[in-house]
Image: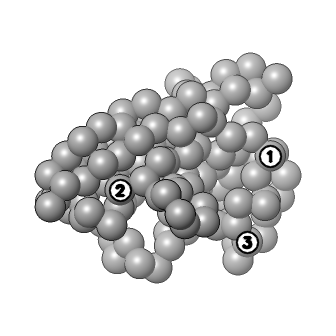
Amino acid sequence: QVQLVESGGGSVQGGGSLTLSCGVYGVTDSTNCMAWFRQSPGKEREGVATICSDDNSRYVDSLKGRFIISQDNAKNTLYLQMNNLKPEDSAMYYCAADYTRIPYWLRLHESQYNFWGQGTQVTVSS
């Protein structure tokens, strides 16, 4: 069984930074894609960023370069560096992984990912 465990969330003032981590456990094969999603109360889950084995990363257009996704394959860990945080970034952030080939244009769609963490809360104050 694959388990994903997020950490690094917390409360930060607008303009600040946080780095989220996602540890992957129970996996012997490398993932094809990993991704970060977020969901705030009353809203649908939104794809934030993804990185895949073809070395391509993708971000939701609204981020405008503020976030960076990366991974440490040796540690089976995914990261999301979040810079210049805004109150609208407040959400529960989820780590996701999949072991199938995902077309580039679908990599921010939650339906493409079979494994999910429990989430880590990010709260950005004004």
* Badge 3 density bin: few <14, some 14–19, many ≥20, Cα 10 Å: few
**Residue indicated by mark 2:** 90
Point 60% across, 66% down: residue: 44
* Side (left or right) of 6 relative to 30: left
Point 74% across, 20% down: residue: 26
Q: What type is the residue that disc 1 sits on?
A: Asn
Residue 47, which numbered label? none
Where is residue 32 shown, x and y percent of the image? 74, 49
Where is residue 61 shown, x and y percent of the image? 46, 79
Residue 20 visible to an observer of this rendering: yes
* Side (left or right) of 52 relative to 18: right
**Residue indicated by mark 3:** 106
Residue 56 visible to an observer of this rendering: no
Point 62% across, 36% down: residue: 117
**Nearer the N terminus, badge 1 or badge 3?**
3
Task: Tell me where residue 121 sits by quadrant.
Answer: top left
**Nearer the N terminus, badge 2 or badge 3?**
2
Farthest top residue?
A: 26
Q: What type is the residue that disc 3 sits on?
A: Leu
Give the distance between the C-alpha atoms of the residues marked 2 and 3, in whole angstroms. Answer: 24 Å
Q: Is residue 96 above or below residue 50?
A: above
Q: Are the residues tagged 2 and 3 within 8 Å (C-beta)?
A: no
Query: Quadrant location of the N terminus?
Result: top right
**Residue indicated by mark 1:** 114
* Badge 1 density bin: few <14, some 14–19, many ≥20, Cα 10 Å: few
Q: What type is the residue that disc 2 sits on?
A: Ser
The mark closer to the camera, 1 or 2, is: 2
In terms of secondary structure, where does tag 1 sit? loop
